[in-house]
Amino acid sequence: MASRSGKLVVVGQGAAGLAAALSAAEEARRRDVAIDITILEKAREEEAGGNTRFSPSYMRMAAPDRIAPGFEDDMREACGGQGDTDYFRTLAEHATLTMAWLQSHGVEFSIPPYYLSVGPPRIQPVGGGRAIIERLGQAAKAADVRISYASAALRLILSEGRIGGIELRAEGGTTIALDADAIVLATGGFQSDPAMMQAQFGPLARSLKLISPGTRFNSGDGIRMAQEQGARMSGDWDGMHIEPVDPRSSHPAPVVLVYPYGIVVDQAGRRFFDEGAGLVHETWEGFARDIHFARPNGIVYAILDSRLFEITDYKRAIRSDVSPIQSDTIEGLAAQICFAADFSLAHSWAERRIVPAPWCTQA
């Protein structure tokens, strides 16, 4: 065993942070190298896990040992051809190895129906993202990785131009300096920092609803710490993952993804969106951004007839815990959702009960 123990600090205990810490511990063991690994997590233990903990964690794979057809092409298309092709290729080349590594730590996968649309195949960890956090967390602790909860990273400490440590605020407000030979920043984005959101997306970004309870810890700490030390920024800063949700619900990620099965109208009763423009995963981000940034009050309505209820497991695409508004007439529906509109064009379509759900957006 090496005489000197190296020190690695990983900031963030979501899937990325746990994977970084655990893989480092395993590699050190293979090489017979002593290493002291600490994860700093801003949340308390019962809240830790970032977005991963609350995510269904669908992955664009045909099976754990096989990527989906068009894996790289789909990513290029999603970013309008502006993405890094080397990055996409690296993801594709390492995807099956990564799934195998997760499986080796007890993460099991299924091939679930993806909402209600037929589309590219996907796999999902049994138990969703929480299963990834729990299994990797157990493995990390078994590998002697130390996890320090309620510990907010504040700034990187450099010594002669090299990483020398990190300053953090521990529970109770005490500021501590922790020595480190290397630091991995796995702190997520900046969704919960209103100033950073406004700088990238404008004033309306301040009112975006966060997608999960874990997202409130994503306040851009890692980005700021890196920038302070002259790190070069890259990537698309005005992009985001955003979905239409039911603003009445208090559930994490109460998405409403049934809009391809009906029509969508704004608060004046006007249609503004081509509901059949693509599969739900191909349209939800542009659709949700339109709702929040371009529609009055960030609210629209999905109007569907009662045939929705005939779709097997339709609730996979509606994760709200609040029942939809219902009426047997167009006029009764309009009265309930509080707008006066000319529904003459909709009369021939809406032959049965109308079921709308109000939407706002979340990031």
Image: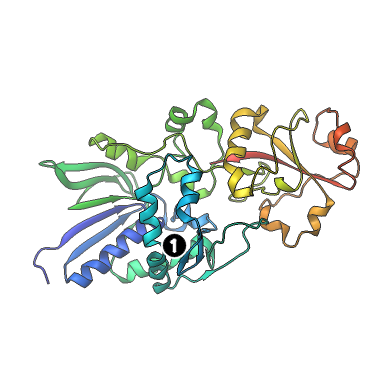
Q: Residues within 10 Å of mark 1 (few under 14, many from 20)?
A: many
When asked about the image quadrant of residue 145, the answer is bottom left
Tell me the quarter of the image containing the N terminus: bottom left
Q: Residue at x 33, y 68 (%)?
A: 141
Query: Tag count in the figure?
Result: 1
When asked about the image quadrant of residue 336, the answer is top right
Q: Which residue is mark 1?
A: 133
From the viewer's side, name the closer residue of 237 and 357.
237
Q: Is residue 37 left or right of residue 102?
A: left
Query: Can the viewer see residue 321 in this picture?
Result: yes
- Where residue 74 sits: x, y (%)? 50, 50
Residue 273 higher or lower than 138, as above or below: above
Q: Residue at x 55, y 58 (%)?
A: 56
From the viewer's side, name the closer residue of 74 and 174.
74
Q: Is residue 263 left or right of residue 255?
A: right
- Where residue 323 sits: x, y (%)? 76, 50
Display colour scheme = rainbow
Amino acid type at circle 1 is Ile
Give the SS element for disc 1. Answer: helix
From the viewer's side, name the closer residue of 321 and 342.
342
Q: Is residue 3 left or right of residue 81?
A: left
Q: Residue at x 72, y 49 (%)?
A: 322
Residue 312 higher or lower than 362, as above or below: below
Q: Is residue 7 left or right of residue 238?
A: left
Query: Can the viewer see residue 243 in this picture?
Result: no
- Where residue 258 sits: x, y (%)? 70, 49
- Where residue 190 sits: x, y (%)? 42, 39
Q: Residue at x 70, y 44 (%)?
A: 276
When asked about the image quadrant of residue 31, the answer is bottom left
From the viewer's side, name the closer residue of 344 and 302.
344
